[in-house]
Amino acid sequence: MSYLPSLRQLEFLVALSEEEHFGRAAEKCHVSQSALSTALKELELQLGVVFAERTKRSVVMTPIGRQLADNARRILLDAKAFVDFAQANSQFLAGELKLGVIPTIGPYLLPRIMPKLRRKFPDLRLFIREGKTNELLHGVHNGHLDVLMLALPYEIGDLTTYPLMEDNYKLAVSLDHPFADRARVSGDDLDKMQMMLLEKGHCLQRHALSAFSPIGPIQDTSFEATSLSTLVGMVSEGLGTTLLPDMAINAGLTDQFDVALVDLDKAYPRKIVLAWRKSSPRAEELEQLGAAIKHLIGNRNVIPET
């Protein structure tokens, strides 16, 4: 009988190909480095191939190692789909579900809806991971996450999406700024204005720059923030201006700062959606989860279903 590797060995191989470092791969798989190294060495001997060139300082995957890691990744996705299918058919919206969420949504929306979701679906165990959009998309495509809550427009490949709401912006300025007493401003008012924004990698950075496309603000390259609260603090000190999403403002982001919030005329909103793999066996469940979240958000700024 041909030797069949364990799913755990395949997981180790995929982790090594992604990290190219035995220590980090072991940490990712929650095992000791020696356990991971021994399991992969055994797999190499059984298959008669070498996965990686090892030195004291680095790990370089061989061509066959990369190909086998790609195959292993697909096998692991199929195995996960096997388990997900069983869970989905044993009880609706129950068991473990891994949700990714971007940091310009998570802190401002999830505290509002999580207690009610838990009451509505008491057998559902939601594991939440916060991260930048690209990182989370990688997690969904590779099967490490089941579903992602993110903001569009953004290139997401062939994922299925469920619309939740639209999120508009306001201009945040210091109290002595010339726009502080304005009822609203337009793209023409902000055209070529340097604005403090989040660092690259946050989708809100792109959205803010394109809110009035093709006109509108440009990024102040002398400063990039890692959080919205940092941006608000800088604005309150008169160091610049920024665009803030209504979701964060409504959650109290600006309550402790002396800033003026000015409405924007005809700005393009960001669209908050759930996204998952088309092949997910839990697609029907995820649609129901999206409908529940949409209901909990309420009617304000909700995107009509298509």
Image (tube, grey):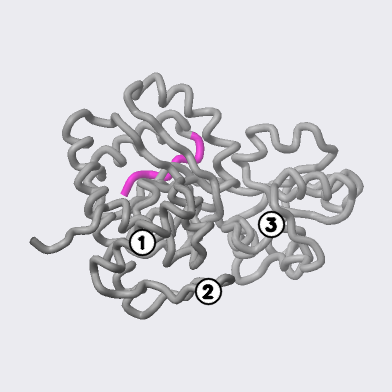
The answer to which of 67 and 122 lies nearer the viewer is 67
Q: Which residue is mark 1?
A: 40
Residue drawn at (45%, 76%) of the image:
53
Dot in front, 1 or 3: 1
Label 1: how many Cα within 10 Å (few below 14, some 14–19, many 20+) = many
Residue drawn at (34%, 57%) of the image:
159
Q: CA distance from mark 2 to mark 1?
A: 16 Å
| 15 horizontally vs 151: left or right | left
Q: Position of residue 124 (x, y in %)?
A: 34, 28
Amino acid at circle 2: Thr
Q: CA distance from mark 1 to mark 3?
A: 41 Å
Magenta-drawn segment: 300-306
Q: Position of residue 143 (x, y in %)?
A: 34, 53
Q: Which residue is mark 2?
A: 55
| 78 horizontally vs 53: left or right | left
**Depicted 208 relative to depicted 263: above or below:** below
